Each structure stands twice: as C-alpha cells, then as structure tokens.
Image (cartoon, rainbow, N blue to C red):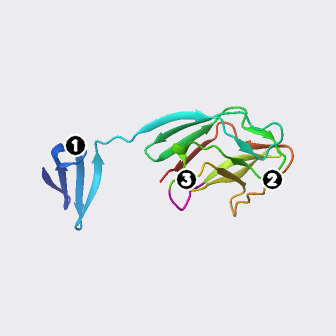
Amino acid sequence: LLEALDGLVVVELRPSQLVAGQVATIMYVSGQFLLISSGIAPSVITGNFIPTWTGFGGSPPTGRIFYQKIGSLVIAQCDATGMTGTSTTTALTITNLPTILRPQTDPAPRVVCMVTDNGAQAVGAISFGVGAGTMVFYKGTAPPNAAGFTAAGSKGLSPYQTLMWSTL
C-alpha cells in the first residue's frame, strides 16, 4: 500500500516483507525510511529482590525492591517499609542488582532519587557500573557526593519511591 499524506509518502508493509513477520508502518521523509510502528511487543519481566546493602552497622534495610522491565526500560519501586537502616559510614550502595536490570553500555545512567540521611529526606542520585551489580547512592545532585551521607542516624531510600533507567 502506498498513499500520500500532506506531502509525505506512507508505505505499509505486509507481514511477508518483514523479518519478524509482523505488520509495520514505515514513513519515507526526505530520502529516509522511518519505522513508525510495528506489531512487535517488547518483552516484559517482573520480579523483586532484597538488596544487599553496604554502609550500615548491624541493622541494614530489610525491604524489597519490586521491578518491571519492559524491553530495555527498568521501572523499580521501593517497599513501603524497611528501606532505611542505622548508618555507620558515609557511603551507601546496593551490591546485588539482578543481572537483567544492569545497564550494558557507557555512559552508565544516573538516576535522581530521594534518599534518607540522618533521618531526613534529601535529593540524591544513583550511578551504575556498566554490567556491574552495584548501585552507588549519592546525596545531592550538583555534583553528587558518594561520601555525603552522615555516619549516624538512619539512611536509605524513601518508601514507595519509583526509579527508572535503561539497560541499553
């Protein structure tokens, strides 16, 4: 099928013309073919894990992080309770990020988040190592400070917090 819409040529390919055997709409603009839509749905994986934390004494956080991965997009939500613990250092990390949630290319993403430091909420950030299972948390965002937490009181993540990043 070929039709012109306001000077644009729209071509609809038949399933036999696509490698995946799916219907797709391609738009031709200024000598370029652009994929507008396809019938290929991204994979969806859901799960949860109990983080292994560093930066705590005898009482680290005990809550879970629930996630849904849609294609390469990860959406993670913190548990309602158990996301803070007693701080004994100025650093905060999670060291067991599941393999399917790990970014695979540079630059590794940074995510803005809310952290708890010495019992008070603060703006923070998270960085990831490429392909690594460690999430490093920062207090502040300009520039983030990995050693910016107080080595006393409670620290961790805010309850119900939703985080998003790409694994690409």
Q: Closer to the observer: label 2 or label 3?
A: 3
Q: In this orientation, which residue lies closer to the viewer: 52 or 24?
A: 52
Magenta-drawn stretch contains 108: yes
Q: Amino acid at mark 2?
A: Thr
Instruction: Please provide percent x and percent y for residue 39.
Output: 28, 42
Instruction: Please rate how many residues cluster around mark 2, counting C-alpha atoms within 10 Å: few if below 14, some from 14 to 19, many from 20.
Output: some
Looking at the image, the residue that sits furthest to the right is: 152
Query: How many numbered marks does the figure carry?
Result: 3
Marking on residue 58: none
Q: In this orientation, which residue lies closer to the viewer: 123 or 47?
A: 47
Query: Label 1, label 3: how many angstroms apart (C-alpha)?
Result: 32 Å
Residue range highlighted in magenta: 105-110
Q: In this orientation, which residue lies closer to the viewer: 127 or 139?
A: 127
Q: Which residue is denoted by mark 3 in the rendering?
A: 131
Q: In this orientation, which residue lies closer to the viewer: 32 or 94?
A: 94
Instruction: Please provide percent x and percent y for residue 78.
Output: 64, 37
Instruction: Please rate how many residues cluster around mark 1, counting C-alpha atoms within 10 Å: few if below 14, some from 14 to 19, many from 20.
Output: few
Say which residue appears at 83% left-offset and 46% top-offset: 118
Say which residue appears at 21% left-offset and 48% top-offset: 18
